[in-house]
Image: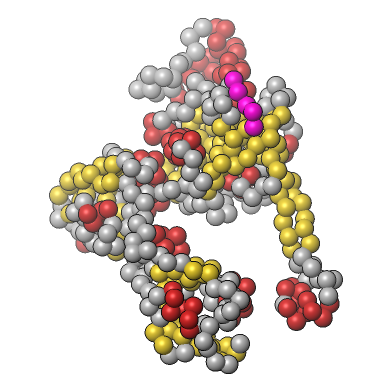
């Protein structure tokens, strides 16, 4: 009876359209289950041990210069060592490994152990907190067994998958399940944002950075988080699609020190039933463009505010994060085909994938000790600065990139637009430097913050 159930299950979950999915056909294949797949894929999944050094204050009062002077060195910041445990996947024979940023991104020392007990020191060559992806390079590694990356756009709900990792530090473990959802956006924990595959294969602490593979042993995703109130797996886990991992690997090989996303230069919102009705659409679909920068590549391609982007490279997009995922997979220098919906007419438009332009030049400066706010970093607002700080597309003027220790105490925040100092308009970063050098006893800063005007007044 058990054998009959296994055969029926295999036939049900292996769609005939997936030519690469092989249904067990012999008694020996059925009796072995997933053993051949695991035997082929497991050596490419590694255990990662990371050491993170943090510093903290024993008491919040000690961060104030007055109390530091009063107590001497008693309240000095203390360094603490945190050990992080996770998993990784070997992507190439010469030692490129992918893991999660939250596992290794801030590590000062990384040790990688393979299934055959070899140990390698590793360094992060490309990391991105927003995507929660880090690419490692193993020192003096060669002839490693790597996993093949499958086209994750071809993954379907209901496919059998295996999760391989090192949960709770007990050693390499394999769990099975199915793909239970696609296009999950904004579902990861921490600062990670994006587009995820959902699975019910058990994923527990230590599985982070491990492999989610199909029944052929190909990598379809990197396990990154779970949805849980208890901290244990409740059957809802998320994995970063392999197509995005492939783009990270490409940029790491090209020597990028940080991940470069294509710049859309637009603000958008998901279509809802009310907007769809106002546009005369039968069903809500796509992303409505609500704002657009003048030099946006979409603007150059003929898009306008009010247009709807329904597909990118033939794949539907129903949120800004899905749209950004599709653009990121294409990568800088590529061209994406976007489906534009306007006045009921659908047109396919080619859009160049570019970096946010640093024009006009940002002219960023860091103020020195000769000014009232040493450590303050300001820059001229341009597309690159706007994208980096997440500012409105219409932002202009001089922007606070980093308030520095004194600026933070005065109430400044990154992203503040400095309109004036002591009643004088600020148009360039040099205006800021001069105004904060030649100031009187009192200083007044006129700012814009998240669309609101405010003034900060303090005594130097």
Q: Residue at 55%, 55% (x, y): give it.
A: 191
Q: Residue at 53%, 29% (x, y): give it.
A: 91
- Is 168 or 84 nearer to us in this picture? 84
Quadrant location of the N terminus in the rendered image? top right
Is 255 positioned to the left or the right of 31 in the image?
left
Q: Position of residue 152 (x, y in %)?
A: 42, 33
Q: Residue at 15%, 52% (x, y): give it.
A: 344
**Relative vertical location of residue 248 with respect to residue 306 in this rendering, above or below:** above
Is 147 positioned to the left or the right of 299 in the image?
right
Quadrant location of the C terminus in the rendered image? bottom right
Q: Which residues are magenta?
A: 139-143
Q: Position of residue 317 (x, y in %)?
A: 33, 47
Residue occupying the far bottom of the picture:
441
Q: Is residue 326 visible?
A: no
Chief secondary structure of the magenta span?
A: loop
Is 457 positioned to the left or the right of 317 in the image?
right
- Is 254 or 303 nearer to us in this picture? 254
Quarter of the figure with residue 303: bottom left
- Is 278 or 312 nearer to us in this picture? 312
Q: Residue at 33%, 64% (x, y): give it.
A: 360
**Relative vertical location of residue 39 with respect to residue 209 in this rendering, above or below:** above
Q: How did the renderer colour the structure? A: secondary structure
- Is 25 or 301 nearer to us in this picture? 301
Q: Position of residue 315 (x, y in %)?
A: 32, 40
Query: Tag count in the figure?
Result: 0
**Relative vertical location of residue 361 with respect to residue 396 in this rendering, above or below:** above
Q: Is 246 within the magenta?
A: no
Quarter of the figure with residue 343: bottom left
Q: Is residue 291 visible?
A: yes
Q: Position of residue 39 (x, y in %)?
A: 61, 18
Is 331 positioned to the left or the right of 163 in the image?
left
């Amino acid at each position: 009876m058990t054998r009959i159930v296994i055969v029926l299950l295999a036939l049900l979950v292996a769609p005939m359209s997936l030519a690469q999915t092989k249904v067990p056909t012999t008694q020996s294949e059925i009796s072995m289950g997933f053993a051949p797949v695991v035997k082929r894929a497991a050596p490419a999944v590694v255990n990662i041990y990371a050491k993170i050094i943090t510093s903290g204050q024993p008491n919040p009062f000690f961060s104030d210069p007055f109390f530091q002077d009063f107590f001497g060195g008693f309240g000095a910041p203390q360094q603490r060592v945190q050990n992080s445990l996770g998993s990784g996947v070997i992507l190439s024979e010469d030692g490129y490994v992918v893991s999660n940023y939250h596992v290794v991104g801030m590590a000062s020392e990384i040790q990688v152990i393979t299934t055959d007990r070899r140990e390698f020191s590793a360094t992060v060559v490309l990391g991105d907190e927003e995507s929660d992806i880090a690419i490692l390079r193993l020192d003096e590694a060669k002839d490693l067994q790597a996993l093949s990356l499958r086209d994750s756009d071809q993954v379907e709900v209901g496919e059998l998958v295996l999760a391989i990792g090192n949960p709770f530090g007990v050693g390499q473990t394999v769990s099975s399940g199915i793909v239970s959802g696609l296009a999950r956006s904004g579902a990861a924990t921490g600062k990670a944002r994006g587009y995820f595959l959902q699975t019910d294969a058990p994923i527990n602490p230590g599985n982070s950075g491990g492999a989610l593979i199909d029944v052929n042993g190909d990598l379809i995703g990197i396990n990154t988080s779970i949805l849980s109130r208890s901290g244990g797996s409740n059957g809802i886990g998320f994995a970063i699609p392999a197509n995005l991992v492939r783009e990270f690997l490409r940029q790491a090989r090209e020597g990028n020190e940080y991940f470069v996303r294509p710049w859309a230069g637009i603000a958008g919102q998901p279509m809802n039933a009310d907007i769809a009705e106002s546009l005369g659409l039968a069903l809500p679909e796509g992303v409505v463009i609500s704002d657009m920068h003048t030099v946006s590549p979409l603007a150059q391609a003929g898009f306008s505010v009010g247009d709807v982007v329904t597909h990118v490279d033939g794949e539907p997009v129903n949120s800004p994060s899905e749209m950004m995922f599709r653009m990121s997979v294409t990568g800088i220098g590529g061209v994406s085909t976007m489906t534009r919906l306007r006045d009921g007419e659908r047109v396919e438009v080619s859009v160049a994938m570019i970096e946010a332009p640093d024009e006009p030049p940002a002219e960023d400066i860091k103020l020195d000790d000769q000014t009232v706010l040493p450590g303050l970093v300001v820059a001229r607002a341009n597309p690159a600065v706007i994208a980096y700080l997440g500012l409105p597309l219409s932002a202009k003027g001089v922007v606070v990139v980093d308030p520095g220790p004194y600026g933070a105490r005065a109430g400044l925040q990154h992203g503040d637009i400095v309109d004036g100092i002591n009643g004088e308009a600020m148009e360039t970063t040099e205006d800021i430097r001069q105004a904060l050098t030649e100031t009187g006893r009192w200083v007044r800063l006129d700012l814009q913050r998240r669309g609101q005007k405010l003034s900060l007044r303090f005594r130097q």
